[in-house]
Image (cartoon, rainbow, N blue to C red):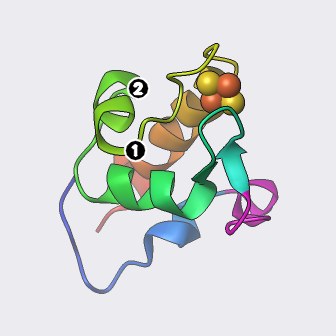
C-alpha cells in the first residue's frame, strides 16, 4: 500500500468499522483494533503478516474474519489517488 499523506486510511473504512478503535479487536490476545489498523497501514497485507506484527488471531483465531475485513477495506485500491 502506498502511503499517501493526503489520504487518511480510516476514510477507507465503513462507519461501522471505525467504531471502538481503542477496544480489543482480538480479545484472546488483547490487541486493539487501532493497532491492527496501524499494522495494515504499515504494510501488513495478510492475516499472517498482521499476526506476526500484532499477535492478533493467535488465540483460537476467532477474530480472523474481522482482520480479513480490515485488510480488504484498507488495501482496496479504488479509494487511493
Ligand atoms: S479474538 Fe483474536 S484469536 Fe480470538
Magenta-colored segment: predominant secondary structure:
loop
Disc number placed over residue 67 in the picture, else none: none
Quarter of the image where one finds residue 16: bottom right
Q: Judge whether residue 45 is colored magenta.
A: no
Return the residue nearer the eye: 79 or 31: 31
Q: Residue at x 29, y 33 (%)?
A: 52
As drawn, 15 above or below 33? below
* 53 left or right, relative to 34: left
Mark 2: which secondary structure?
A: helix
Residue beneath disc 1: 54
The residue wearing badge 2 is 47
Q: Secondary structure at mark 1?
A: helix
Quick check: 22 above or below 32?
below
Q: Residue at x 20, y 69 (%)?
A: 3
| Residue 23 in picture, x, y percent from top left | 74, 61
Please tell me which residue is depicted at 77% across the width and 63% down the height of the picture: 15
Q: Earlier in the sequence, mark 1 or mark 2?
A: 2
Q: Quadrant of the C terminus?
A: bottom left
**Corner quadrant of residue 44:** top left
- Image-quarter location of ligand 1: top right
Horizontal arrangement in the rendering, residue 68 relative to residue 38 (left or right): right
Q: Which residues are magenta?
A: 14-23
The answer to whether one can see residue 63 in this image is: no
- Judge left or right: residue 23 versus residue 68: right
Inspect this view and state whether residue 11 appears. yes
How crowded pointer 1 is (Cα within 10 Å; few <14, some 14-19, many 20+) is rated as some
Amino acid at each position: 500500500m502506498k502511503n499517501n499523506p493526503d489520504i487518511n486510511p480510516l476514510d477507507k473504512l465503513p462507519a461501522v468499522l471505525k467504531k471502538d478503535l481503542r477496544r480489543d479487536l482480538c480479545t484472546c490476545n488483547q490487541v486493539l483494533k487501532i493497532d491492527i489498523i496501524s499494522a495494515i497501514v504499515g504494510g501488513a497485507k495478510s492475516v499472517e503478516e498482521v499476526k506476526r506484527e500484532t499477535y492478533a488471531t493467535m488465540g483460537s483465531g476467532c477474530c480472523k474474519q474481522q482482520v480479513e475485513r480490515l485488510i480488504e477495506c484498507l488495501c482496496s485500491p479504488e479509494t487511493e489517488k
